[in-house]
Image (tube, rainbow, N blue to C red):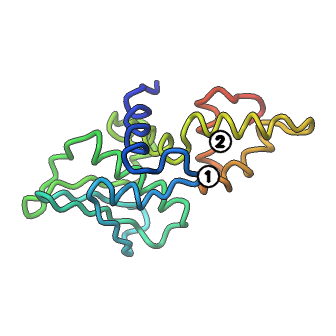
Amino acid sequence: MPTRRPELAAERVLQESGQAGEIPVDIEVVARSRGAQVVRERLDRDVSGLLIRDGDSVVIGVNDLHAARRQRFTIAHEVAHLELHKGRPLVLDHVRVNFRDATSSAATNLEEIEANQFAAAILMPRDLVVEEAQRLLDDPGATAASIVPLLAQGFDVSDQAMEIRLTNLGFRRQI
């Protein structure tokens, strides 16, 4: 069950980073506004990204083997961990690390669920998605399913991410 905490945190971070109202959100600007450096590296295929916090240094590592839109979601997911969570107890040279991998999307871990909710909310802000979806649905031939690729392109996210976001926002008609 989605909670409002990730959604509210995403709205706040968008405002503070100067990205509120921007389509698509420049997630790297958002990450930098939180003090994080984004680094793209070749990681194992099943690892999308990681967050390393060491004192004042914050690095978001992103798997450069993944599609650009997946990388955007990964960065947003790691910003969520930075904002919402203190870090998992895995220690590497006294560094706390958060990984984004296949477990992240399984909806079995509260931190991962919140990070995915935050990532969706920051890349696809509620009000902007609803406004754009309603505009597109004003076309007599449009259906919720037909607008998914158009919205996904505009917000620079995957069709799947947009489909899930629309469903979570109540656009359940034939998605």
Q: Nearer the viewer, residue 87 or 106?
A: 87
Q: Which residue is mark 2?
A: 163
* For residue 26, side relative to residue 51 (left or right): right
Q: Earlier in the sequence, mark 1 or mark 2?
A: 1
Q: Nearer the viewer, mark 1 or mark 2?
A: 1
* Residue 148 image point, x, y percent: 72, 45
Residue positioned most to the bottom: 42
Q: CA distance from mark 1 to mark 2?
A: 12 Å
Q: Place residue 145 in its image quadrant.
A: top right
Residue found 38% across the figure and 69% down from its top: 44
Q: Is residue 66 left or right of residue 5?
A: right
Q: Which mark is residue 21?
A: none
- Exactly how many numbered labels are in the figure? 2
**Pointers 1 and 2 in contact (CB under 8 A)?**
no
The image quadrant that residue 67 belongs to is: bottom right
Task: Classify mark 1: helix, strand or loop.
Answer: helix
List x then y, in percent, for residue 72.
48, 59
Mark 1 highlights which residue?
Answer: 155
138 relative to 67, above or below: above
